[in-house]
Every structure is written in structure tokens, then in C-alpha cells.
Amino acid sequence: MNKLLFSLKAIFYLCLSIFILVGCEADRQESLYDPDAPKGLTPEIIAISPVDGTLAGLGEVTITGKNFSSNKDEVMVFFDTERAQLLEATPTQLVVLAPNIFGDSIKIKVVIHKVELFSNIFLYKLMPPVLEIGKFLKQDVAFGIAIDVAGNLYVSFDNQEIKKITPSDVTTSFVPKTTFLLAHNMKMGPGNTIYAAVAGRIRKIATIDPDGIEGTFTSLSGSPRDLDFDVNGNIWVAAGSNIYLVKPDKSSTKISSFPILLRSVRVFNGFLYVSGRDEMTKEAKIWRAEILGENLGDTEVVLDVTAATWLEEANVLCVTFSADGEMLLGTDHPNGIFIYREADGSHEALYNGLIEGDIYSMSWDDGPYLYAVRQFKDEDGNIIAKILKINMMKEGAPYWGRN
């Protein structure tokens, strides 16, 4: 009897187990989750441009690939852990604004909403647009700068010292004490020799050779403010309201005069560019004249600074050029440096909001970097100087003394 009851119970529990299993299977078949359902096509990065990297926070990056989306709400692009601003999206191409992070091996990946896997990873370079460089005391004020063919920067300070800053930002004393107080502007000349415009009690073009030994190239009756070499090795000097030509044999001649006090000169594309300002009338202009051997052709106004409402009555303190012909204006405007294009008169602030005003002098290296000295007053009225290294992503116009 007991064996019969045990057998009946065993059969009952077996049937109950089968019933439960069948019910569970029915439930599974009616579930919304299907483990075999498609998980979406995984995005794939094939190429990224610009291929050599771009500027952090400013550059646009184009990502070419597969399985993206035209719906911008479905697309996320990450640079390491930073999500980039998406500007354009198609199934095969994404355009983003690079986030403000720096590095040589930043990991870029693409994520598509409702797609299980993110893309393959591309390593990319983001560079800072502007850096402060140089090690010097707060009270030491920088003035003229020059750069040699190796990319070393030489800076004249108002304590009669010239410092050298290497491309890796190592600062050393190149000339501990010059005979002159300071050089308003400097250019690198033949033989890796620095030529300096020295004004004040001493009015001359000073030289500093590669060993840091100072000499005098020539003395002038005017007070030199700026200088630049032409293709023939002649030096064009702005001194007071006059332009002087200083030849390789050290002889000098006054070539022309202007109605205002001159601040800067720059040789570009066969022309001499001159800028200046009349402190009494506030008239400020930039002229150019063709270089005709040892003379100048007729002068023409390139930019009426006073009438340029976009400069908001700012002073142009220095001028240089990029290799493609854009004029760079160093100013005391809050935006610091402006780009001006002669061909159509267009203009814009360089890296708007990243460079402050009072740009005293500028000089390019042989690569993509523009160096600038910024002089400004702190809240206590003390003059402070900073040296900026600006990545222009293109080269500057030639300096014929260096080249």
C-alpha cells in the first residue's frame, strides 16, 4: 500500500513539473526580448582629418566611416571621456568641434544610440592654441624678440638682459648685461647674429653674435624702433618718423619720411610695410611701398587704422605676415591680435577670446608658431610681460635675414 502511495505521488510531481516547464516555455515565447534579434550595425571609423591633428577647442574634425546616422540625436563622439560637439552627421561622415583637451594620443570613438557596440578607436592629436612660455621674474619686462633657425627664442628685457628660450621651454641667460637698456625690436640676421633696434640715449643697430658677444653695426641720427631685412641683405629701419636704409657695408641713408611716429616695419612680397600713429591727432595708418633696390616706390595706404571701426580705436603696435599673405596686427584691443586681408578688406580676431590685448612685438619661427610679447598693467599699475607661443597651423612669411 505504501509503495502504491509513493508511486502515485511520484507520478503527480512528475506531471506537475512537466506542466510548469511547458508554462514557462509558453511565457518565453510571448516575451518581448529576443536574444537573436539584430543589435544594430556597429559604427566603424575609417579615417579622420586633419590627419596631423588640430587645435583643441577650435578645430573641426571630420570622421569618415560606416554605420553612422543622419540623426544627430543618435550620434555621440568621444575624445577620451569628453563628448565632442556634433556639427554635421551623415551615415558615412561626422563633423565635430574638438573639445578643449590636449594630448598626442587621444582616443576617439563613435557611439550610436541603440547599437550595442561602439566603434573602433582612433588615436588623435589635439594641440593647445596658445601657451605661455619662459621663466623670468615678474618685475622683468620683455620687449623685442628674435628667433634663430633652430627655433630658439631670444628676448630683450628692461634689466639689460637677453634671455634664450629653447623650443622645449628651457630658459637661460644669453647675455647677462648689454650696454644698452633694452631693444625695442630684434631680427635674426646673417651668421645667426641678432640685430637689435636700440633707442634712447644710444641710437644704434646693435649686434649679438652666437656667442652672446655684443657689437655695434651702425649708429643713426634717429631713434630706431624696428628693423627688417630684405632679400639683398639691406636693413630697413623705422626711426622716429623716418625710414633708413642700412646696407651690409654699414652705411646708412634716410630714404623717406612720414607724418606720424613709426612703430613697425616688415618686408613682405617685395614691399616694405610701415605702421605708425600720431599721438596728438590720433591718426594711425599702415602704408606699403615697393622696394626698388635701395629706394622705395610710391607709398599707398593699406589700412586706415583710425577709420577701422572693427578695431574700436585700438593702437596697432606691431605687424607681421603669414606665408599665405594674411597680415597679423598686434594691438592693444582686448582681443589682442587681428587677421587682416588686403585683397578684400576682410578681418577677424585671431582665436577670439583666447589672446588678450597689448601685444608689443611678434615673430614667427620656421614652423607653425607665432611668438608674441604681451605687455600690460596689473591691478597695482605695474607693467607685466608674458610671452605667448601661438600655434597658427601654418607658416609665417620669410625673414630674409634668417633665411
Image (cartoon, rainbow, N blue to C red):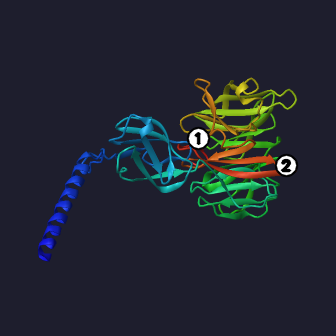
Residue at 71% in and 33% down: 274
**Residue type of the residue flagged with mark 2:** Glu
Seen in the image, is 149 located left or right of residue 19? right
Q: Nearer the viewer, residue 286 or 204?
A: 286
- In this rendering, does residue 222 appear at all? yes
Q: Determine the secondary structure under disc 1.
A: loop
Quadrant where the N terminus sits is bottom left
- In this rendering, does residue 308 appear at all? no
Crowd class of label 1 (few under 14; some 14 to 19; many from 20; radius 10 Å) = some
Reading the image, the residue beneath label 2 is 379
**Residue type of the residue flagged with mark 1:** Val
Q: Looking at this rendering, what residue extends furthest in the front direction?
A: 1
Instruction: Note whether 153 is above or below 272 in the view shown.
Output: below
Going from N to C along the chain, the mark reached first, 1 or 2, is: 1
Instruction: Note whether 66 is above or below 276 in the view shown.
Output: below
Reading the image, the residue beneath label 1 is 231
Residue at 62% in and 56% down: 192
Q: What numbered label is drawn on residue 336?
A: none
Q: Nearer the viewer, residue 40 or 24?
A: 24
Crowd class of label 2 (few under 14; some 14 to 19; many from 20; radius 10 Å) = few
